[in-house]
Amino acid sequence: MHRLRTTVVRLRPITAPQTAKSQSQARLAAVGGALRTFQPMRSYTASVSAEPFLNGTSSNYVEEMYYAWLENPRSVHKSWDIFFRNANAGAPPGAAYQSPPPLGGVALGLANAQAMVGVQPNVEKLVEDHLAVQSLVRAYQVRGHHIAKLDPLDISVVDFDEAPVMVGLKKVGEKRAPTCLASLPYFICLAGFPPFYGLDESDLDKVFRLPTTTFIGGSESTLPLREIIQRLEMAYCQSIGVEFMFINDLEQCQWIRQKFERPGIMQFTLEEKRTLLARMVRSTRFEEFLQRKWSSEKRFGLEGCESLIPALKTIIDKSSMNGVESIIMGMPHRGRLNVLANVIRKELDQIFCQFDSKLEAADEGSGDVKYHLGMWHRRINRVTDRNITLSLMANPSHLEAVDPVVQGKTKAEQFYCGDTEGNRVMSILLHGDAAFAGQGVVYETFHLSDLPSYTTHGTIHVVVNNQIGFTTDPRVARSSSYPTDVAKVVNAPIFHVNADDPEAVMYVCNVAAEWRATFHKDVVVDLVCYRRNGHNEMDEPMFTQPLMYKQIKKQKGVLQKYAEKLIAEGAVTRQEYEEEIAKYDKICEEAHARSKDEKILHIKHWLDSPWPGFFNMDGQPKSMTCPSTGLTEEELGHIGHIASSVPVEDFTIHGGLSRILKGRAAMVGQRVCDWALGEYMAFGSLLKEGTHIRLSGQDVERGTFSHRHHVLHDQNVDKRICIPMNHIAPNQAPYTVCNSSLSEYGVLGFELGFAMASPNALVLWEAQFGDFHNTAQCIIDQFICPGQAKWVRQNGIVLLLPHGMEGMGPEHSSARPERFLQMCNEDPDAYPVSEFAVRQLYDCNWIIVNCSTPANYFHVLRRQILQPFRKPLIVFTPKSLLRHPDAKSSFDDMLLGTHFQRLIPDSGPVCEKPDGVKRIVFCTGKVYYELTRERKNRGMDNTVAIARIEQLSPFPFDQVKVETDRYPNADLVWCQEEHKNQGYYDYVKPRLRTTVDRTRPVWYAGRGPAAAPATGNKAAHLVELQRFLDTAFNLDAFTGQS
């Protein structure tokens, strides 16, 4: 009887905060479709605290009645009409009730009101009874989901009154106390808890006026208590549990109430039921077919949540009906093949090919397992007869990592088609219950949902709630009652639904799609289901969840249950049902037969983000050359003028910024540029050529080091800004620069997804400091680095990572270049035989550079777009060099005919007598300027050559060989400011050795091995710097070493 005893406890009244009165004074309520634009004034002469029934939820109820009365006095009971008239005339609330007065008696005085009240029934009892009903309605709306029949296994009990959460398994087979009114009147529950509502059995047939916050009455405004309870039970305590009362928007709450409270809402046509059954057949028989054919293969089947397929198809149908043309989806491995087959409509024979271990892999990369692959497909939606594009993103096993990637791609597609409201493009994200509660990137992604430069105008989240992790019980997997509680941070309504009730699932998904189309906000559908097998088909779940899986073994399949229901209703015959099964089984068998004819396993058939027209028909680049990345003098001057001016009239900028712009103008006049101006030249020229640029990250608008200033702020007008980059040319592409939330994992994933949508955009993510990328390591390791090899998916995203040892401590010093270099796919022991400038770029998995000049930074950004393919670009950007007097470039280095320099050779005195050079020091980045200063101080300009390797990956073997051959008598030294076990040394050394055919040793000058990236002591930093500079210029430092 536990369930019976706790029913009313869980639905106990919710006490309103004492601040309700102050909040109500500023409220604009929607009544009858019109906004109330006046503020009601009360003229009570008695203290509200003196009236026992005007406090807590009582005041809420009276306030609702009062608002309704103000709008239309006839909309409330006559007794309330007189009550409010008298109260406004000065009567205290406890004495304001009287018989309906004549029309002229509105202004009755206090004495008359008190004289007439004695002959009336007990007004306090009347108000208290109505307030009890108000509390009861609100309790169902707030807590009805606590006792809804959500669990198809009927074994889990969540005690919502315990903190943080207590989840346990009841004894399997224990009989549960029914809560259905048909079998047990609600008053029996009420009788045990008289303090809660003050209602008893005698009140069940009493008629009560319904508050304006419920729609259970339909066209009726009054109902008996018995009917009120019955309708509330049907609305909130059956197969659907609704969480929405935390939403702080009245219109949205009222919308949800209407969708779930109106009588007769769960009605489906015969055609809808038959379609639902057919979809259930496909979902179920697909898994059974795979199990028959490949019983020993991992496939992460959908058994136990077969209603997911009709759920997704319902969302797609409804969204298509609302005008959506493209849907981007992300999901984990469970049920992925079923979604590909029955939602995306991937050819079944191509799916079945993935199970054939004998097929030869095509030469398209290393590939991925079948339950990680994605797909893009454009087809006609059969329900709406409209075209719709479906894209399921490929993703790794790292659960929820794909969430921000999907959002980024969705945002990009909305941007490119001018969909500013999200009416044409939307996203659907599928989640597992354990990951949805446990993975922090879920929270990061939710917090992007309403940011101007990141919103996708509402995502539909579908949680496949197995009620278990891999082997982990929810009671030790989360601290919240539900796995979906994280969605409350953005006021997303949460619809829990028993997945063994397909019609309830279908209804909820329709509502979710309507919610997204109406409010353009996130919504969560929680499919409470079970997992018939273990984590995969080979796993034994009885080791850890014996009671649950004993019950699952006894559980009748949802298809069988639903088919029996429809047959009993007469909606279908058993013969029609069996014919539907036979029809789909035949489709599977025929596809299986075709799959045996395949000889090669193609990964490109699973591409989730095609770029039409960018490649040849065979997927190869249209050329293998890259044009000059330089510009004309006129273009440089024009962009430089924009960068040093405010192209908006009457715009007041900060005085310090005026000095910066004047400095830029002076540099343009001198035909030189610093780092910020070099970036401006690259961006401005690409925008002028029609390439959209999106720069995102923490504080990127100004720049962490106050060097960029791409967004100017008016000092006198709030929120008035100017983006000069959008004033380059009349027909330029738009420039998007946006400060992100303080997130790396979520935001980098978002920008990666944005870059997937089109090859004709330069998408950059800048870390506030280079080492901040490590909180986004999953995106780097699982998507950016191996993305093309696993999924045949090119991507041109750019990572800007500020890097440099400058005595600022162990954090913010190193962008960890060693990690990126370690993941390069290049063989350090093989000298390439291919063409170096472009072919080597095409063969690598990503490009890594550490530029030492603004001109080279300018060129590498332009090359990223002008080259005929797309590769991720990792740029280790400087900090002190942003303002270093020597770190400037002449316009001559940026004119037409110039290119990115993979290696910058020494052009000083060493070139005159190369035979006399004793040492060539190879380096990269900022340390070059420290080396040249030290060399000058030591007077060794003729004996030590310094060469800068600007592009680390792919390694410039050819240009390094030119330098080593030029100085035949020089020993080879690699110098870096990073510690020996970090930085570039372990990457560069074997490549240098390969270049010289191992004829000369490669010596090291730099900091020794260390655990931390840098010292926290400024003096120690300077000592270390001088020590390795001494080593670099001591020509006897390596004498006697082998």
Image (cartoon, grey):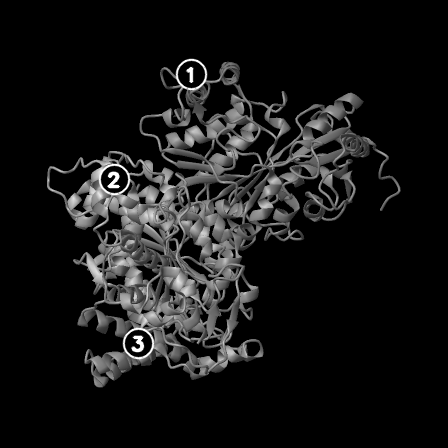
Picture quadrant where residue 847 is located: top right
Mark-to-mark CA distance, 3 and 2: 64 Å
- Where disc 3 sits, the SS reads helix
The location of residue 755, given as percent across then percent down, is: 43, 45
- Where disc 2 sits, the SS reads helix
Query: Which mark sits nearer the N-terminus, 1 or 3?
Result: 3
Q: Depth check: 331 or 349 in front? A: 331
- Residue at 44% in and 39% down: 762
The location of residue 289, given as percent across then percent down, is: 38, 79
Mark-to-mark CA distance, 1 and 3: 67 Å
Q: Give the vertical position of 561 relative to 447 (above or below).
A: below
- Residue at 58% in and 23% down: 888
Q: Nearer the viewer, mark 3 or mark 2?
A: 2
- Check if mark 1's residue and mark 2's residue have beta carbons within 8 Å: no
Q: Residue furthest right?
A: 1040
Numbered badge on residue 87: 2
Question: In which quadrant is the N terminus drawn?
Answer: bottom left
Instruction: Say which residue label 1 marks.
Output: 652
Image check: 659 left or right of 761?
A: right
The location of residue 253, given as percent across then percent down, is: 31, 51
Instruction: Say which residue label 3 marks.
Output: 281
